[in-house]
Every structure is written in C-alpha cells, then in structure tokens.
Amino acid sequence: LVIIFNTVHDPLSASIGFSILGCAITWRLVPALKDSFLKANLTGKDVNKLDKQIIPESMGVVCATVYLVCLFLFIPFPFMEWFTGKGIISRTEEFHAPTFPHHKLGEFLSAMLSLQSMTFLGFADDVFDIRWRYKLLLPTIASIPLLMVYYVNFGETHIIMPIPLRFLLGRVVDLGLLYYVYMGMVAVFCTNSINILAGINGVEVGQSLVIACSIAINDYLFLNGSSPAVEAHLFSLYFILPFIGVSLGLIMHNWYPSRVFVGDTYCYFAGMTFTVVGILAHFSKTLLLFFIPQIFNFIYSVPQLFKLIDCPRHRMPKFNPTTQKLNYSRVHIQKPLGIPAFVILKIFSSLGLVEITELENSIEVNNFTLLNLLLLKFGPMNERTLTIVVIIIQIFTSCIAFIIRYRLVHLFYEI
Ligand code: UD1
Ligand code: MG
C-alpha cells in the first residue's frame, strides 16, 4: 500500500504494488475459502494419489476475482494526471485543448468486461460441466467486447506478409472480417489449449506463469522504444503483472500435493488475459510464439478432439499405486479401424508419437496428449517431476520464441 500511495504519478509502480497485494490476498483467501467450496460441492477428486482425496475445485474464481478487484482499483492510475491537475496544465499550454483519452479508458473497460465474462462462463463450466462443442463457443462470446473496441479504436485489418510468401499475395493483405475471425480464434485457442494441457497438480498455473513472465519480459524490452509501442506494452504490463501476482498466490496451494484445484475457471481466465493483451497491445503473433507446447498439444490432440479416434472423458496420465508413479493412459479402439483412424495412426506411429498394442478385437494406444507422450518417451514419472518437466519445456520454448522474435525475424520481415 505504501508503494501504491507513493506512486500516484507512476502507474507502473502502482501496478507492481497491486500485483504484490493481489498475490498476498489470493494466498490468504484461497485456504480461507476452502470449506465454503467444499460445502457448495465445488470439488474434484485428486485422481493421481493413493487416497484420491476430494479437494475444493474452481479456486480460479477466487484468483480471478482478486485480480479484477486489483484492476478496478488500478483504473484511475494511468489517468492520474487528468485528475491531479497535470493534465489541466497541459491543456492550457497547447493550442488545441487535448481531451480526456476516452479510447484508452474504453480499452481498459472492454478488456475487463471480456475477462469478467470469461471468468463467469468458466465458472459456469465448472458448475455445469459444459460439453466440448459449447466450451469452444464460450471464449468467442467473451471476446466480443474486445473485438468491438478494437474495431472502434484501431480497425486495422491489414497484415504485412512474411517476405518468403510475398510472391503469392503481395506485401500487404487486407483480411477484413477474417481478421476479427482470427482474433476470436486466438481467444478460443488460448483458453482451451491451457485447459487441455491439464490434469496433474500445478501444471495449469505453472504453464500460465511461464507464458505471463515471457509476455512481461517482451513488454519490458519495448519500454525504451517509440511512443505508441511503449503505451501498448505498458497497457499489457498493467494486465499481466497482477495476473502473475494472483497466479503466484494460487500456485502455492495448487502445487504438488495440491490442496486446491484451479478448475476450468482459471484456465479460461488465464487464456483470456493473454488474449486481451495480445490483441489490444498488437502482438498476437508473438503471443502465439509463447504457446509452442500448447500448439503442439492441440495439434496432437486434434484426432481425439474431433472424435476421429475415441476420446475418453479424461485423458490425463494413469497413476500406478504400486510404484506411485504416473504412466501414460491408453484408449481402446475397436477393430476394424475406420480409414481416418488408420491413416492417423500410421502417420503418428511413423513420427514416433504413439505406442500401439494389437489385441484380438481392438487395439490399444496412448491418449494423444503432451503429458502422455513425455511419459511414453521418458518412462514413468512422479506427478511433481512431470509438472516440472512441462514447466522446463515451456521455459525452453519461450527462449526459442525470443530467438525467433528478435533474431530470426529478419528472415521474414524488414525490421
Ligand atoms: C480436460 C481434458 C481431459 C483432462 C482434464 C484434466 C481434453 C479433451 N480434456 O478436460 O482429458 O483429463 O482436462 O483437467 O483434453 N484433476 C486431477 N489433478 C489435477 C487437476 C485435475 O486429478 O491436478 C482432475 C480432478 O478430478 C478434477 C478434474 O481433473 O476434478 C478436472 O477436469 P475438468 O477440468 O473438468 O476436465 P476438462 O477441462 O473437461
Ligand atoms: Mg479443465
């Protein structure tokens, strides 16, 4: 609080102050609300343990609420000069009196509306266990306020083509309405891709924290640049820093062995936070570079998500009570195989992505997720070790993302 009150004119320091506050409040609030969640039957079974305890789920809603309250309290800070007189002085100094930056306030409010809607819909998913096809729709709905303000404030739908592709479509292409479809798809991807790289203690928050820190580092690298970029990346930092704060508060209770589960609420809330900053600060392509493991897991999952291969309700790894380690989980497919299933299995097995066991009337194959693939390649692991391996991969791919964005970019664009 001291930092916040001392830094009225420095929104970034205020944001750091609110992030620390958000972390502390989430850390205290989550255990305090555990019993209320248990009473309300917001619970889940910790399936990868011997005793399979029932623990509170959907704790992401606590984390998202603290985050939103921090952001509500933060709103005046970027506009402080308008309230403290500095803005009035500059108004008299200039010939054309500047007006209050309503567009900036509009961006803030629409971003928060999208985040709030996503949290609400994610919580509804946790309570009602919504079916997959509707899950895909939820982020599209929540991103509408964001797309609306993008249309009004920027409306930019031209993209600069990468140099190797220019011979096909020229240097600049106007995507028009397709650009909005693309932005809606970013929201659907960011939210769901985190939700399907899940099911072991700490992995949802762990991967989100690495992505958030990568975004924050990328924003920081822009702060000494030209004015519009600085403003956009400051905007991104105002949203990402409190996210890092509340996620740190949550992971302390979600880390192995979990005392609480974060639920779909957290996965949607995290994905939407990344979408908001990626779209409104104009770095959606760089944002997607920080999602390399999620992109891999999504593409790998496509045959099961689109039911070309059977998809059980849960695809998380299987716990072996004797060794207390996780092994990859499998799915049974009845023979004869359909043509799509046959082709997919052929391609995946030639790439070393599946292990197939032939049975009399069926075949058995590992579920197509990154978690199962790691267990297939490196052998059975303890749950905590697997989470750490996923986080290390996320950090490693973020480093690759930075190399692509700041070194290899010259091959694709003249920057
Ligand atoms: C997605 C995945 C599903 C995976 C599940 C795990 C797809 C298509 N769906 O489904 O395969 O099994 O996430 O979250 O890929 N749980 C644990 N330990 C944890 C976290 C979760 O045991 O650390 C269990 C709990 O029983 C919890 C449940 O997973 O109740 C949550 O599943 P839910 O988020 O409802 O599954 P989906 O998101 O629908
Ligand atoms: Mg989930």
Image: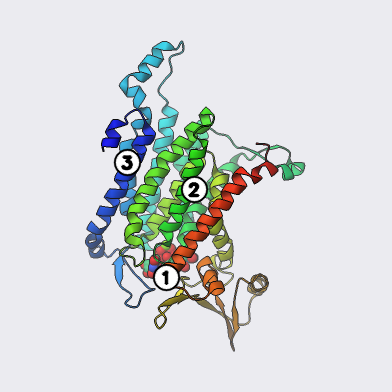
Nearest the viewer among 173 and 76 is 76
Residue 38 in the image, given as x and y percentages of width and height: 25, 65
Task: Please say whether residue 25 is visible from this viewpoint.
Answer: yes
The amino acid beneath tag 3 is Phe
Point 42% across, 26% down: residue: 101
Q: Which secondary structure, mark 3?
A: helix
Q: Quadrant of residue 407?
A: top right
Q: Which mark is residue 383?
A: 1
Left or right: residue 119 versus residue 340 is: left
Mark 1 crowdedness (10 Å alpha carbons): few <14, some 14-19, many ≥20: many
> Distance between the Cα atoms at labels 3 and 2?
20 Å
The amino acid beneath tag 2 is Ser
Task: Please say whether residue 412 is visible from this viewpoint.
Answer: no
Q: Which residue is mark 2?
A: 214
Mark 2 crowdedness (10 Å alpha carbons): few <14, some 14-19, many ≥20: many
First of labels 2, 1 by sequence position = 2
Ligand 2 neighbours mark 3 (CB distance < 8 Å): no
Ligand 1 neighbours mark 1 (CB distance < 8 Å): yes
> Distance between the Cα atoms at labels 2 and 1?
25 Å
First of labels 3, 1 by sequence position = 3
Quarter, ligand 2: bottom left
Residue 36 in the image, given as x and y percentages of width and height: 22, 60
Q: Quadrant of residue 347?
A: bottom right
The amino acid beneath tag 1 is Glu
Nearest the viewer among 140 and 262 is 262
Labelled pair 3, 2 in contact (Cβ < 8 Å):
no
Q: Which residue is mark 3?
A: 18
> Distance between the Cα atoms at labels 3 and 1?
33 Å
Q: Which secondary structure, mark 2?
A: helix
